[in-house]
Each structure stands twice: as structure tokens, then as C-alpha cells.
Image: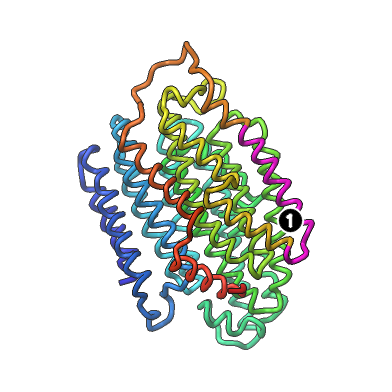
Amino acid sequence: MMWALVLLPLLGAALSWLVPDNRRRVWVLPVFSLAHLAVSAALLVHTPPPSPAGWIWLDPLGKLVLMANSVLFTICSLYAVGYLSYRLKRPNRVLCASLLVCLSATSLVVISQHLGLLWIALEATTLTMAPLIYFNHNARSIEATWKYLLICSVGIAIALLGLFFLAYSTIVAQQEVSLLLPALIRDAAALHPGWRHAAFIFLLVGFGSKMGLAPLHTWKPDAYGEAPGLVGALLAGGLVNCALLALLRVYQVAAASTEGPLFQQVLLTMGLVSMAFAAVFMARQSDFKRMLAYSSVEHVGIIAVALGLGKGALFAGLLHMINNSLTKGVLFLSCGNIHRAYNSKSTQFVRGALRRTPWSAALFLAAFLAITGSPPFAPFVSEFLIVSSAFGQGNHWTGGLFLLFLALIFIGMASTVLPVVLGEVPPDLERTRYRDAVPTVLPPLALMGLVLVLGLWIPTPLQELLHEAARLLGGEA
């Protein structure tokens, strides 16, 4: 049944490619994404045992990422029906097929227990997202696509070298040669320390570039800024989770060896550096979609800080992964509506969005408050738990810098969001076809409802799953 997660979207991609009509083709997306969501829910309740060779299994870490990605993709596919109705003059065959192939690749990442297979699946997500970033077919989008492919592919190639080093460390240590995760965790302490250390460095750099940890984040502002809001939501809320899962697999091996404390310290440093970069570049940002790219850099930094702190912060970091995924979906879908209504993403022209697109602007404002850690939304809970863990461990410098960067980012983001949402619509602004409608407002509204609910109440099954996943990383239940 786990293979259905991979094969169903591939079947949908083939079907969408064969449908000749732009209007009808887009309906393939919600049909197959809902089917994928149903299979995902069934697997969360009744998880099959590992495959005979052990390459395929859905463990608690995979379940978390599968749940977040499947929900986000389903909501985005429903949004795509309304969004693409405004873009009928542009062919959407490649977009629809690539979205479903990407869903298949992300599902393979989730269920892979072999690091080589995981690497192949992660590279497939890189390749399938490229045509989506290039959807607008202009000079800026091709530049963004080229930068995305170049930096992410170099990063993934560096990660491949890391896997080679990890495999070679088993040979030098005269252990069973394997990239299966359970075997690596079991033999981690016995692996050759030099090759193991080199492997962890290369894997951290490679998967860190795919996540967008600073200073490996330079592809994000262009890719997020030029891609449609629908694609930006999947990049920031879905693909980041896949890269993070790959990093968590390495984290599991590092924690089982003597390299665990060093690996955590590097992650802690990179997390704080990412938050610092976001605080600097978010200030006075005139392009509100590029601003969201720096927000993504901030939040992968927050998760890295949680991983670096370890112990109780691991629960909070995994919770923040889910919260960030859902909230980024609201931000990108609502700002995509605003962009479509104004035909611009510059704060010089986009003003008074509450008057032109009241629902989208209200959602954009609410999601801004949520993503910056304001109560009662879900990111506040996870960020509060992370900073509490930092002070609880006596790591006062980390806790202090964490709070400082959050404050600076709030101010910087507010200086962009508030002028977009408030004020008067410029009188000389061109008229556009887009106005708020149910197909493009209801999906981000549903996500915003989830963000609010998780801020007030975390369901017991989700809490238990988070604790199980944290224990896999060596965290305290």
C-alpha cells in the first residue's frame, strides 16, 4: 500500500498529460491529491511493516512529513483550479504533470529507508520543480529557474559525495557495506571516524543548500519571487520538509555516533546565522514575495536551532516544521491572489489590498501575525517551546539571540506587509480581472483555520506522533 503513495500521483501525471483541454486538465490535480490524502491517512492509522529488504518503511519522522505535505498539496491542488482559471491563455499541461510527479517524488522521499534511494527521490523533486518556477516564461523566471537548478543540484551533488564517504567509512571499518538507515544507526559508532566526519560535513552542506539554510539560501529569493504563489507554497511548505527529512536521517546517524554533539553545534550555529540573514535582508524589502523567501530562511533556521539544542527542543522543532508548512501555504496563496489583483508584487504599487481583495488581504495579515510568532497561532507555541528549552538548558546566549532575531524580523516584515494591506488603493492603478472568489479564498482560509486550531489545541494522536519522532532523534519524550 505504501507504493500507492508514489504510483497514484504518477498515474495522475500521465492522465493530465493526455487531457487536451486546459479547463478540464486542472481537475486531475484535486482528484488525485485527494486520493493521495486518503491513502496517507490510512497509512498513518495502519502502517505496514518494512519491505523485505528494508528499503521502504514509514516511520514516525516520515509520517509527520507525509501528513504535512499531503495536506498542503491537497489544499494547493484545490486552489489551482481557481488560480488556473485566470491563466487559461497559458498552457498548463507541464504544470499539472510536474506537480503530480513532484508529489510522487516527495512521497518516495518520505518512505525511503535507504539513503541512496532517498537521494534519488530528493533530486527528482529538484528537477520536477524547475518547470513550475519557469511557468511565467519571462526573463526573470528563467534566471530564477537557472539559479535554483544550479545551486540545488550542486548541493545535491555534494550530498552524494557525502553518501559515498559514509559508505566508504563502513568499508574501512570492515562493517557491512550498506546505506540502509537501521544498519547505519546500529554501526554508527564503529564507522571510521575520519570518513564519517567528512560524510557528515558534506551531507550537511548538501542537504542544507536544498533546505535553504544560510549562507546556502541564495536560490530562494529569486525562485520564490518569480514562481506562482501556488508553486511558492509547495517550495516553502513541502520541499523544505523533504530536505529537512533527509537532514534528519543524517542527524539520526550522527546521534548514534560520537559526532552527535558537534553536529548539533554546527546546526545551532547555522540556524542562528540563518535567522540573522533573514533579519538583515527582510528590512525594507519592497518585493513582498521575495520577503517570504527570507521568511523561509528564518524558519528553517528556527528548526535548525531546535535540532541543535536537542533534548526537549526536538519535539518543538518537529512541531514547528508542521506549523511553518501550513502557515507558508496561507502566505503564498493569499499573496498570489494579491499579486494577481494588482499585477505587481512591489510595495510601490500594491497598497490598500484590504479594499481591493479584502479576504486575501485579511488572510495575508493573519498569516503574517502567525508566522512571526504571535499568539494564539500555532507557530507561537513551537517557538515558545524552543526558546523555553534554550533557557531551560542554560543556553542563555542562544535564547537571547533567538528572541532578538524574532523581534527584528517582526519589525522588518511588518514594514512590508502593513503598507501592502492597509492604506488607499493607488488611483492610477490598472484594472485587472482578479477579485476574491471562493475557489481562490477557501483553500488558504482552510489552512489558516488549521494554523489557529493547532495554536489552541494539539490533538493527542499528533502529540504522540511528535514524541515518537523526537525519540528517534534522541529527544526526551
| Residue 169 seen anywhere in this rendered image of the structure | yes
Amino acid type shown at disc 1: Gly
Position of 346 relative to 205 (above/below): above
77 displayed left or right of 186: left
100 displayed left or right of 376: left
Determine the secondary structure under disc 1: helix
- Percent coordinates x, y for residue 42 in the rendering: 31, 68
- Percent coordinates x, y for residue 415 in the rendering: 63, 30
340 displayed left or right of 140: left
The residues colored magenta run: 392-414
- Percent coordinates x, y for residue 252 in the rendering: 59, 73
Q: How many numbered marks, from 0 up?
A: 1
Q: Which residue is mark 1?
A: 399
Q: Residue at x 57, y 80 (%)?
A: 184
Q: Residue at x 79, y 56 (%)?
A: 397
Looking at the image, the residue that sits furthest to the top is: 428
| Residue 205 seen anywhere in this rendered image of the structure | no
Membership of 93 in magenta stretch: no
Kindly indicate the quadrant of the structure image that contains residue 25. top left
Q: Residue at x 49, y 52 (%)?
A: 325
